[in-house]
Image (cartoon, rainbow, N blue to C red):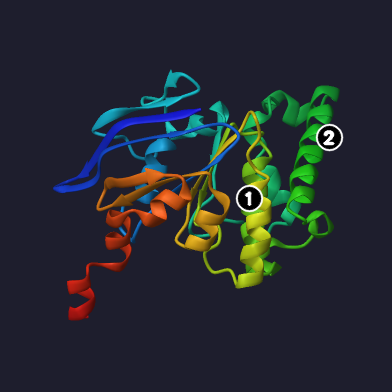
Amino acid sequence: MLTLEQITIKFGGLIALDHVSMEAGAGRITAVIGPNGAGKTTLFNVITRHYFQNSGSVVFLGQEISKIPASEVSRIGITRTFQNIRIFPTMTVLENALVGVEPRLHSGLFSSFFHPPSQQREEKWAREKVVEALRFMGMENKLQLKAGSLPYGDRRKLEIARALVSDPKLILLDEPAAGMNTTEKEELKTLIIQLPTPERAVILVEHDMSVAMGVSSYVYVLNFGKNIGQGIPAEVQRNADVIKAYLGTEEDADAA
């Protein structure tokens, strides 16, 4: 589904990603973990073309996408959520989710003025897609609530629903469990596990190891922009370099 080959990106003298390679396949959740500043969100920004790498390639569904603009990413089948929630608080839950289906719509200026049957059918289809996504997230009874009135956990769910409505081939989840309590995290894990399909891949960036290891089938570990380990969760948890990156050496612990 997605292949990153030797991605390097520099900001002045800082190397944010240093020859990072990874793959994400349909039907599974691939996790990217690492300490703060490891380059995880930068990696997402490269995939979504908000950042352009200095070297390396990004291949999605067999096509090199390194030169496409960020505005086209959703149209080719990639959607994402953000570490900092990005909803429109004064709009309803339904209206917020409808934003996500816009890349799939074909109505133009003519349709906006005259509202022909084709646009009416498209609007009906869009609403059905949105309601389906919100029902999947357990929010079908909150369609008309203002998004700003939602509990924190529901705001996170709304972001995921909005990412779902365009039928993406790849969903990027940037710390979806951030700020959630234990109960909300368990509910979220149950939902995330259901996101991959034979036609859809999921990449998860997550600080909470119980979430990342509990839902993913394969894990990549970044530290200071480098890939220091990868494998199934059990292998990664035993990796000495990963343990050192998270916990430090015995000498570090003694110094602390």
Q: How many marks?
A: 2
**Residue 192, numbered label:** 1
Secondary structure at numbered mark 1: helix
Label 2 Cα crowd, 10 Å radius (few <14 / some 14-19 / many 20+) = few
Q: CA distance from mark 1 to mark 2?
A: 27 Å
Q: In the figure, 110 relative to 99: above or below? A: above
Q: Check disc 2 and report its element: helix, strand or loop.
A: helix
> In this picture, is 216 found above or below 253?
above
Q: Position of residue 102 (x, y in %)?
A: 65, 36
Question: Visible in this render: residue 90?
Answer: no
Residue for point 73% across, 31% down: 112
Can residue 155 be seen at all in this image of the molecule? yes
Q: Point out residue 95 in the picture as x, y percentages from the top left corner.
A: 72, 50
Disc 2 designates what residue? Answer: 124
Q: Decide which of 190, 125 is in the foreground and name it.
A: 190
Whichever of callouts 1 and 2 sits on the residue coming sooner in the sequence is: 2
